[in-house]
Amino acid sequence: MELYVFDKNRVRIGIVEAFEYLRWTRRYSRCGSFEMKAVAIDENLDLLRIGNFIWKDDDEEAGLIEFVELTMLEQEFILISGRFATGFLARRIIWGTEILSGDLGTAAGKLLTAHLIAPSNPARKIDKIAYTPITLGVTVNTQISHRNLMEVITDLFDAADAGIKTVFVPEAGTFTIVPYWGTDSQAVFSKEYENIIEQIFTQSIVDYASIALVGGEGEGAGRTFVTVGGGEGEDRHETFVDARDLQRESFSDDYEEALGFRGLQRLAEHAFVEAFDAGVNLHGNLTYKVDFDIGSKIKAVSKRWGIHVSARITEIEESYDREGMSIAVTFGKPLLTLAQKLKRGDI
């Protein structure tokens, strides 16, 4: 694996010859991230600057350097971190209000074109970024105002269980935002098969909601309400969604559908959590990027714990250090962090 560095003009300016560690975290519906620590030699100080980005020659995505820290203990070190190139989206907001109706793949293209790729204000354009439209078969019907572009796109894709990535072509210096579906895999992960080293299984209904009451425009008895989801007795977990920002005049006959879509988004955010995290044995019977990859639907089994989970691989963290490469895999959606709950408005 070679680790190349490119400048803001997408021109290759060097190779990182040595580093203490690199953590390269790939995500399915969300933006990936990385962190690297290296000795602060002159070559690294010249290359590893904010605004440049790094690219592994065995990967499609590149990492934007967004944070640099220099430390001196017994030795001088440089620590860098950032997000993958999908993070370009985080530099834009929905400038105004957008009404989205139709297939998710088309709706995402509309947002990206209007606010990043070819906006009416040329100052908002980021060069050499394109979008590959595909039909995902997921219908979107909503209104969005003034939110961060990356949060909107990844929230929609996460709710639909669809993937998104930004592919870098080093020869052309271009980035292409690509929606996709993960593949179905025959891979089975289990301690009994000796293809995982360690495992953590999590289930949670702490933030779970099974039914949403969505309130639209109007006041009191004249307010429009829509219910989505279901459940009875103690298995019924209710939540309220204030969708007063959605106005009937924007959707006409599709207004109740738009309210229902907002409710389904909230239920997706408050889904039952079932996640299986594992450190994968790279010398086991499964080969990374051949038998399984980010987005693959696999099975995770623990006879000892009585667990049999069919889930999608939503995150893969690749770690490189002096001892070589290791990977940690997350199957299913993990618990939200405190920061994520605060951003979502739950706290």
Image: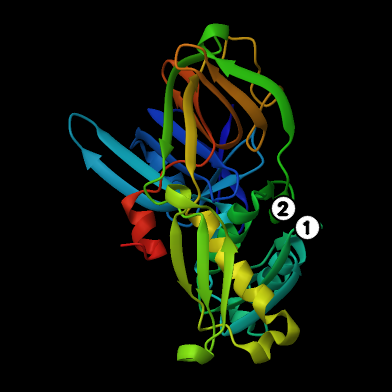
Give the camera-side residue of 73 and 64. Answer: 64
Quadrant assignment for the N terminus: top right
Give the camera-side residue of 53 and 258. Answer: 258
Residue plotted at (42% across, 48% down): 234
Give the camera-side residue of 286 and 103. Answer: 103
Helix, strand or loop at label 2? It is strand
**Image x and y of residue 163, in percent:** 66, 48
**Image x and y of residue 120, in percent:** 67, 84
**Image x and y of residue 68, in percent:** 35, 49
**Left or right side of 94 for 176:** right
Kind of residue at disc 2: Val
Considering every residue shown, the one lying at the far front of the view is 233
How are the residues colored?
A: rainbow
- The crowd level at tag 1 (other Cα within 10 Å; few <14, some 14-19, many 20+) is few
> Residue 150, can we see it?
no
Q: Which mark is residue 178?
A: 2
Which numbered disc flags the more N-terminal residue, 1 or 2?
Answer: 1
Helix, strand or loop at label 1? It is loop
Q: Quadrant of residue 44?
A: top left
For label 1, the residue is 132
Task: Tell whether label 2 touches label 1 (CB within 8 Å).
Answer: yes
Considering every residue shown, the one lying at the far right of the view is 135
**Left or right side of 59 for 3:** left
